[in-house]
Image (cartoon, rainbow, N blue to C red):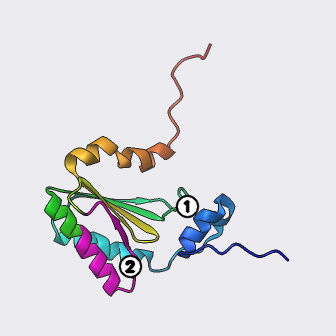
């Protein structure tokens, strides 16, 4: 008698483990926009710079949105992460994982369908997530001018 494999975690994580076919079939969390508003408002209140929201729907199985912002100092970045985690918890999202919050140039918050990257300016330029995930990568390059040999 066979048994189904039980995968712990959120529906998003279960879909990611199941692979591309199942990841496309997952239902998005209807609260994504509410949580996104909480995140961006919190970042604005904390004086984050260059806040960018990238829509990953249909492009990545790990999240529907990516938020990238810059902070000036380790303390500011750690405070921004703590405030986001607290505010999302108050809104009903209890499982927010944070990595790098102890004096790092880059803090990552995994809020389920939203991933938040908080950088110092130098680290943000180095990793270039906007270049990696931005919409301009979806546009095919222009064909070269003139006849092709």
Where is the N terminus found, in terms of image quarters? bottom right
On the image, the x and y values in percent for residue 130 come to 36, 49
On the image, the x and y values in percent for residue 141 come to 50, 34
Residue at position x 59%, y 75% from top? 27
Quadrant in the picture for residue 31: bottom left
Highlighted magenta segment, given as a residue range: 81-101
Residue at position x 21%, y 65% from top? 78
Q: Which secondary structure lies at badge 2? A: helix
Residue 132 to residue 142: above or below: below
Q: Nearer the viewer, residue 68 or 140?
A: 68
Q: In the orientation shown, which residue stands out farthest toward the top? A: 149
| Real-space Cα separation, disc 1 to disc 2, in angstroms | 20 Å
Residue 57 to residue 88: above or below: above
Quadrant in the picture for residue 41: bottom left
Classify mark 1: residues with Cα within 10 Å, few (<14), some (14-19) or many (20+).
Answer: many
Residue 74 to residue 33: above or below: above
| For marks 1 and 2 on the same chain, the one whose residue lies earlier in the sequence | 2
Q: Which residue is mark 1?
A: 61
On the image, the x and y values in percent for residue 80 come to 22, 68
Q: Which residue is mark 2?
A: 34
Q: For this view, does 98 lie left or right of residue 22?
A: left
Q: For this view, does 144 lie left or right of residue 97?
A: right
Q: Is residue 97 shown in magenta?
A: yes
């Amino acid at each position: 008698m066979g048994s189904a494999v039980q995968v712990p975690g959120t529906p998003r994580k279960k879909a990611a483990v199941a692979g591309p076919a199942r990841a496309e079939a997952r239902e998005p969390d209807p609260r994504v926009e509410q949580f996104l508003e909480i995140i961006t408002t919190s970042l604005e209140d904390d004086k984050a710079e260059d806040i960018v929201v990238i829509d990953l729907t249909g492009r990545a199985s790990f999240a529907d949105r990516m938020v990238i912002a810059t902070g000036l100092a380790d303390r500011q970045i750690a405070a921004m992460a703590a405030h986001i985690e607290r505010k999302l918890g108050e809104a009903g999202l209890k499982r927010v994982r944070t990595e790098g919050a102890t004096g790092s140039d880059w803090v990552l918050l995994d809020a389920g369908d939203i991933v938040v990257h908080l950088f110092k300016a130098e680290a943000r330029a180095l990793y270039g997530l906007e270049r990696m995930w931005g919409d301009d990568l979806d546009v095919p390059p222009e064909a070269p001018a003139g006849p092709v040999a």
